[in-house]
Amino acid sequence: MKDVNLCRTLMLSLCIMLFISSMTFGQVLNKPEPAPNPNIGATSPWTAACASVDFNEYFVNFTWSPPLVDANNEFILELSDATGNFDSATELDKVSNQNTTFDFDFSFNLATNVQGDGYKFRVRSTNPALTSPESDAFSMYFIGYKDPILISQDGDGTIPPGGVIENCNNGNVTLAAHNVPNPENYTYKWYRSATLLGETSNTITVTQDGMYFVEIDYGPNCSGSANTLSNTIEIQTGASSGIAIAASSGTALCVGQTVDLVANINDPSWTYTWFLDGAAITSPTVGDSSYTVDSSTTNFDGDYTLQIEGTGICTETTNAISITDAGNFTVSLNNDTNIVLLPSRTRTLSASSTATTPGYQWYRDGSPIAGATNATHEISTVGTYFVRVTENGGACSGNTIDSENITVVLPASFEFVVAFSSTYTSCESTSAVIALTQINAVASNGTKTDVTTDLSGNFSYQWTRGGNAVAGETSNTISLASATENGDYALEGNLESFNSTSNELNATLASGETVTIASTDLALCDGINSITITADMDLSSEIFTWSRNGNTVSTTDQDFTATETGVYELQVQRTGCPIRSNTITIVQFDESIVTTDSEENIIFQEGSSQTIMASGANSYEWYDESNTRIASTDTVTLSEEGTYLLVASIGSCSVSRTFTVSFRDNFAIPNVITANGDGINDLWVLPNTFSRDPDITVTIYNENGEEVLNETDYQNNWPQSSTAFIKQNMIFYYRIRNGGKTLNQGTITVIR
């Protein structure tokens, strides 16, 4: 009889354990399946997804089994990649309102990059976290392009007459689709005379004769509905015609001369196109087998070629014939194109040429200057000048080339411009360099010409500060190295009868001095209602400002008394610039300012240790239970049991924190207690890993699966002395959890 009772007890234990387990792990997610589209009246599920901009709506059926999922659970439908891999799964749909429905449909749309035959589905639940089996593999394509493809040679958009391309001299021909937007987004199937080839890109390079066409590969189920089959291009083997061109006379031309370029084959059915340096100079013209080069045309010289096209022949381009300009030479000026002519002075204009026998003629304002026939010419009059060079020797004698224009002006005045030539920031830089950056010759009509290069060395200079000459500063730059030199600077210059004064530039250098402030404390707390801030500089004769959080709080107190929290700073005015002090931050002391990264009750394995880090204070003192200081940093490492004290201070304000260290219990969770009141093994005592912890929940069930205890921060106090047990030996079941995670579970036998 005793064995029978024991058997019943064990069976009941097993049932309750299964009941507890099913509360967490009982749900079953089934494999998702395609479902009919109710919005189009479909009665059968889809077998392949061929989506487009015109239709893109699909449904998947999903079933699952109880127990119920948590109320905040979400079911998520996911799609694999084209090979069935879920490492980077795509979320298709997500629902949170089907947590009590065991059979429902997801709906989804295909993304435009879905292209393949091995896509699979699966469903995930979030609470509990479970994943369904994967679905079967399906063909799924987004048909982004579904019109007939057009192909041409090199994808240039020109379909040859009759769709025939001659493949010349055993070369190769590249065919490409030219009307498909973003063609690289698709996979293709190329055919030669109805035989499928291995190329899958939007281009193919061929060497064999045949009829070539292509379509986009949308898989075995979707390609037909796309209707992308292209036009056909026939490749035929052709041979070179041996086309060439020759010049009827010499290829070096003088001005007014011409030369005829003539093709060696004149076929009235061929199309001829002439090129100069690779650019077409005639339109494709039937029978146009010659071209006349005229040297009177600008830029006539260069490399000439001829291209032929025609039915049954290869498109060919001849070798180039170079036509040169025999009368070409250069003219160079040895002056700037803008010259300032000072009163009673002259300037010499100079030119050079690569002509074999150059002849020179200078012009002013468009008219030749009598007697000015040399490579140089001295001027004393304003105007616009140029030189005309004539070739007086060689095969092309008589050719002329004009130089650039030279503008010669007489100034009404000069303008000086000065600027900082070194890195400079007002009231921050401690040195600076000011320099003359530009001299402008100003004509009577206000026109300005930059003459810095010509005249910067001709002026005499004097720097002024505040309108007064600065002794010894007579160059066109001035260097400042001290705040005592601050002021408004300008540069004066003299050249013959011209006197010029530059713009005025203010220089405000920092003095380089420093001021430091210090405070009697850093925090306001009980007993400390004000803090005195002082400077290391005598402020009695200074102009100064105390500020709090950027706002002025005093301009008269040499020592400032702070009664509010904030960031304090002192500014002292020197030589027009503020000297800024360091900042002092005063806080309202609150024990919550000081934080630690550990609970007050610390448990770890004997023989190990734990480090505690504190923050929020300026100084830290750690003491053991004998009041011995063991550390004075923001961290301490504890390895022994006991009570430890932290004193954290901000100035004169401090806070104390106590920490208790215990070694982790090594005994196992008891499965038998004797609740007979003898004081021995009367209570179910857990190791301190699970007891007295507010994050851990302890639940106890009786033989009927009813809760008899459910509490956090378990105090090792079950059962209470008043708890009644209806049998001599009773079995209970427990589960220990931290949040949603089960840490331990088992049985407790209570013997009375």
Image: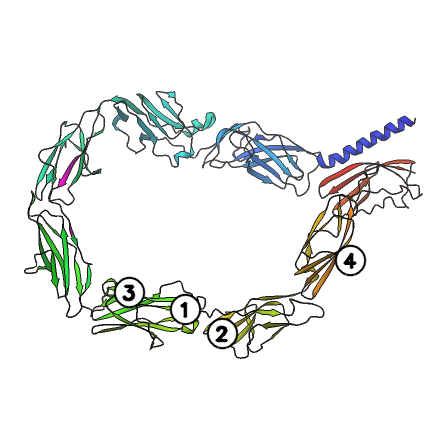
Judge left or right: residue 572 versus residue 725: left
Which one is in front, 37 or 703? Answer: 703
Query: Could you give the CA–CA distance between mark 1 and mark 2, rounded to whole angstroms?
Result: 19 Å
Q: Bounds of the magenta span?
A: 319-331
Question: Of the residues shown, which amino acid type is indicated by label 1?
Answer: Ala
Q: Is residue 182 above or below residue 548?
A: above
Query: Could you give the CA–CA distance between mark 1 and mark 3, rounded to whole angstroms?
Result: 24 Å
Q: Are marks 1 and 2 in contact (CB under 8 Å)?
A: no
Name the spot of residue 471 as percent of width and height, x first.
34, 75
Quarter containing the N terminus: top right
The residue where tag 4 is placed is 627
Residue 703 falls inside the magenta stretch: no
Q: Secondary structure at mark 1?
A: loop
The residue where tag 1 is placed is 481
Question: In the image, which is nearer the foreground, mark 1 or mark 3?
Answer: 1
The residue where tag 2 is placed is 573
Judge left or right: residue 280 versus residue 688: left
Question: In the image, which is nearer the foreground, mark 1 or mark 2?
Answer: 1
N-terminal of the pair, mark 3 or mark 4, is 3
What residue is drawn where x is 15% and y is 68%? Answer: 345
The residue where tag 3 is placed is 438
Question: Of the residues shown, which amino acid type is indicated by label 2?
Answer: Gln
